[in-house]
Image: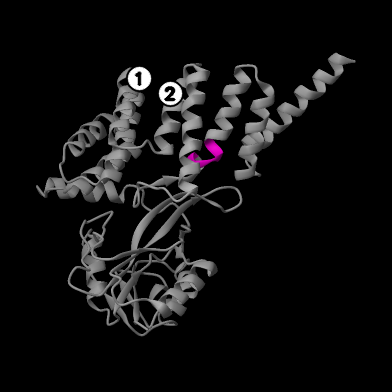
Amino acid sequence: MPTWSLCMIVKDEEAVLERCLNSAAALADEIVIVDTGSSDATKEIAGRFTDRIYDFPWKDDFAAARNFSFSLAEGEYVMWLDADDVLPEDSLRLLLAKKASLSGDVDVIMLPYETAFDETGKAVFSCERERIIRNCGQCVWTGAVHEAIVPFGRILRLPAPIRHEKRGEGDRDRNLRIYERLLKENRRLDARQQYYYGRELYFHEKYAKAEAVLERFLKEPDAWIVNRMEAVRLLAYCRYRQGRDQEAFETLLSGLGLGAPQPELCCDLGKHFLDREQYGAAAFWYQAALAWSRSEAAGWTETDGGFAQLDCRGFLPCIQLCVCYDRMGDHKRAEAYNERAGSYRPLSPYFLQNRRYFAHLRDAGSMAGD
């Protein structure tokens, strides 16, 4: 059975580190903790799990810190976690079984990374990350922020999600600050970093600047297709926010040229028409999102590694189809879609409010019949 090293970079993580290590320690033959300047009890907590604790001066460069942590690994494979990650018990069991039977030719194990959750704790946002990597010369992080190891060799995908259960707000300006420092130092951003820089600008409501960065990114010949698909949607949002709705809509349509439309794009197109009270056209695109989801359930997928807004694969198109058909006067079909939305998120306030609305319609109809 191959040996696995768990490598982590941490700073002031006393609130979450023990939770993380308790969830994953059973997988690791060794645990390597690299501290980048904690002033709380982080090191003391880490010491309950390992004596391999090292200091690394923070340089506003996540790849540098992760590469240092990986350089200390002695295992045949290296796994990474952030301190506010949690490995659920089902995922732990699956990974323990896979570790025991892992063939020697696997280079990278990709796992789902769940980062947002609904009212019941069910994931509504997920992406795929290179989580366990063969300890070799290609096991190298790049990118000062939103760092990554480009997957290589034989890749194994497992349905063993890791949950990012963040506590507190953190420093929401950190990533943008790092990118702007790099640019001030005349450091070139590769295609992937341009995409993430554009995202940061968008989320900081710097729409004109984000638009320019995303336009440049989409011209990069080596941009990953999943990032292209997401960048088209972000570029459209920038244009909507600046009041250029027709241009934004045309940007969304350009995403159809990148391959089979993902449910997120279908939902964006549906929203465009719903916002303009063109309910039939909106329903077409929300139906398309549901059709994609049925294909995915049958095993078809095209965007391994991209962001997945999981509500777009069921709940959101159903709740919006409820609205579309209600506005078109087909209350029976509208209610059916609301009930279907409830099968995805039974505690959603939107679903529950709609259920009360349809109950009121039925009561009013009964009274009118009397």
- The answer to whether 120 is drawn above or below residue 265 in the figure is below
Q: Looking at the picture, how far across and down is residue 59, in whole percent?
A: 21, 62
Task: Answer with the quarter of the image where residue 337 lies.
Answer: top right
Query: Which residue corresponds to mark 2?
Result: 272
Asked if the residues shown at circle 1 and circle 2 are in contact, with their CB atoms under 8 angstroms apart, the answer is: yes
Left or right relative to 267: residue 110: left
**Badge count:** 2
The reply to whether residue 11 is in sight is yes
**Crowd band around label 1 with a 10 angstrom C-alpha radius: few (<14), some (14–19), many (20+):** some
As drawn, the label of residue 245 is: 1
Residue type at mark 1? Asp
Q: Is residue 218 above or below residue 6?
A: above
Q: Label 1 vs label 2: CA separation?
A: 9 Å
Asked if 80 appears above or below 223 in the picture, the reply is: below
Residue type (three-letter) at the residue carrying disc 2 = His
Residue at the limit of the structure toward the front, as seen here:
298
**Boundaries of the magenta span:** 312-316
Report helix, strand or loop for mark 2. Answer: helix
Return the residue found at the far right.
370
Residue 228 lies, in percent from the top left, at 27, 40
Q: Nearer the viewer, mark 1 or mark 2?
A: 2
Residue at x 45%, y 51% (from the top left corner): 299
Q: Is residue 345 visible?
A: no
Q: Residue at x 69, y 25 (%)?
A: 332
